[in-house]
């Protein structure tokens, strides 16, 4: 993709020419799967956190699938202990 952008820059900016093929040909975007830790790796990683409050916060964020910002702004009133929901 970088090569295509370089050639496009050469033609359009340096040579002041339009090359119509750029509108027709585009390489497919590559999709990469995110790295997922195994349960053993996750347990080991969380066991390395020494502060109990920090370990609890990271465990809740991980177990609930929260984004970091959502976990940071989580309040006690957001937790419904009767229905076991956040």
Image: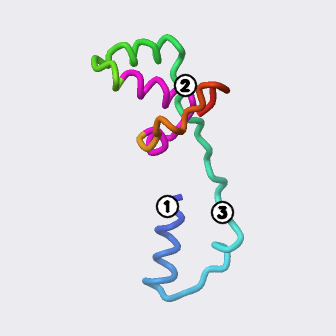
Q: What's the magenta bit mostly, secondary-structure-wise? A: helix
Which residue lies at the image location 32% right of the left edge and 15% below the top edge?
A: 48
Identify residue for label 2.
Answer: 63
5 in magenta: no
Relative depth, front residue between 30 and 52: 52
**Rendered location of residue 17, percent (x, y):** 54, 87
Identify residue for label 3.
Answer: 26
Tell me the CA gap for discs 3 and 2: 40 Å
Whichever of labels 3 and 2 marks the residue nearer the N terminus, that label is 3
Residue at the right extreme, as displayed = 24
Q: Quadrant of residue 53?
A: top left
Nearest-to-viewer mark from 3 and 2: 2
Mark 2 neighbour density, 10 Å: few (under 14) some (14–19) many (20 or more) = few
Tell me the CA gap for discs 1 and 3: 12 Å
Which residue lies at the image location 53% right of the left edge and 37% below the top edge?
A: 66
Mark 3 neighbour density, 10 Å: few (under 14) some (14–19) many (20 or more) = few
The mark found on residue 3 in the picture is 1
Whichever of labels 1 and 2 marks the residue nearer the N terminus, that label is 1
Image quarter where the C terminus lies is: top right
Tell me the CA gap for discs 1 and 2: 42 Å
**Rendered location of residue 12, percent (x, y):** 51, 82
Q: Are marks 3 and 2 in contact (CB under 8 Å)?
A: no
């Amino acid at each position: 993709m970088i090569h295509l952008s370089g050639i496009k820059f050469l033609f359009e900016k340096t040579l002041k020419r339009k090359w119509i093929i750029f509108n027709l040909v585009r390489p497919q975007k590559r999709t990469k799967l995110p790295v997922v830790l195994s349960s053993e790796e996750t347990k080991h990683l969380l066991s390395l956190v020494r502060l109990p409050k920090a370990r609890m916060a990271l465990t809740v964020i991980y177990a609930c699938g929260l984004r970091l910002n959502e976990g940071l702004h989580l309040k006690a009133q957001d937790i419904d202990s009767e229905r076991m929901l956040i």
